[in-house]
Amino acid sequence: MKKFLVVLAAFFLIIACSKNDDGTPTQEQEEDEIAFNREAMLINWADNIIVPGYEELESSTTALTWVVTDFIDEPTESNLFALRLQWMDTYRSFQKVSLFEIGKAEEVRFRDRMNTYPTNATEIQDLIANGTYDFSLPSTNDAQGFPALDYLLNGLGEDDAEIVSFYQGANGVAYKNYLESVSSSIKVLTTLVLDDWNNGFRDDFVANSSSSASASVDKLTNDYVFYYEKSLRAGKVGIPAGVFSNNPLPGNVEGFYSETFSRTLALDALNATEGFFRGRAHNCINCYDESFETYLDYLNTIKNGEDLSDLIIAQFEVSKNKMLELQPSFIEQIEMNNSAMLQTYDELQRNVILLKVDMMQALSINIDYVDADGD
């Protein structure tokens, strides 16, 4: 085991790691959990991971609005190509913060409005025809965000010339207005969330370092596990592969109209969840600080004779390697060999058990969301 430098702490944890007869933590265990420097972990999360992630996304959304303006002013194939590249870059930046549904992000339904897929092409066409739309309405979740841009940039025709014709034709102004409104909404939502972190929420988040259902660690841990289980494991892989239905649903892949982008987005999300578990600073390969990993090691959490943190990290690596074996297009992968998709889902599922059951029990954090499909 890798934490022999904390032998004295481990000695005091021998009794603390036991449970009462009813399965609840002993007083000693609760005291040890409080003794861990939760505030230092929250500081690392906020200052080195979350806020820098939103800063990157905010910068990218600004660039996106500029390129959208260029395309609206001159809807050509070359400008469409440039807009697609910026859309892809911004979509990838979003994957790094999508798991942080807390504070203003929770209030404005950030993830739902940014990335509900499959997008509803019929609804988008109806809204364009009507010329009026309110993206604050939950009913429009599937007609906005990055999936809507995917349709507007990749799904309007068989080739680039046909897509550009929608923006050059008789209804071009309506299509341009909708494109501008979707990209502007993405920018506005991102700025709202970032400004909230920079104007008080960061300090409140760090100060709320106690051990309770309403504390920052407990809330964000639930958000993190929920994201991994529902948005990553199920949304990006399990649902399209048909795990929860009688047949595969290739039309439900992320980045459907771009065709070759789904694996990239899933890998970005997987890397983000692993990085957060390990406390890795934003865009820094070997910059680690207090995290779930160090918290579990402090508690000397063992499963089957091994450090639980090592098991989780190893399973992240297995899952990434399995995902890298898939085709860049999950549509193509499902149609050619869906068994490989199902195998990737199985590897992702193994970490659901380790995170949702073993880790949360070790940290004495109760699940605060409804589990409809089991573990």
Image (cartoon, grey):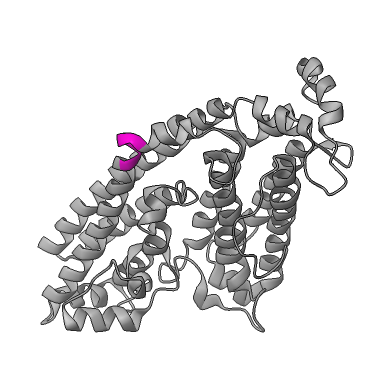
User: In this rendering, does residue 163 appear at all?
Assistant: yes
Percent position of residue 312, x then y: 72, 43
Question: Is 194 left or right of 290, judged from the image as shown?
Answer: left
Q: Quadrant of residue 305?
A: top right
Which image quarter is the N terminus in? top right
Q: Is residue 199 magenta?
A: yes
Q: Is residue 244 above or below residue 74?
A: below
User: In this rendering, does residue 283 appear at all?
Assistant: no
**For this rendering, which residue is in front, 183 or 222?**
222
User: How many marks do you count on the picture?
Assistant: 0
Percent position of residue 136, x then y: 29, 66
Q: Residue at x 22, y 74 (%)?
A: 133
**Residues shaded magenta:** 196-200
Q: Is residue 285 above or below residue 246?
A: above
Percent position of residue 187, x then y: 26, 52
Which image quarter is the C terminus in? bottom right
**For this rendering, which residue is in front, 187 or 139?**
139
Question: Is 135 left or right of 130, judged from the image as shown?
Answer: right
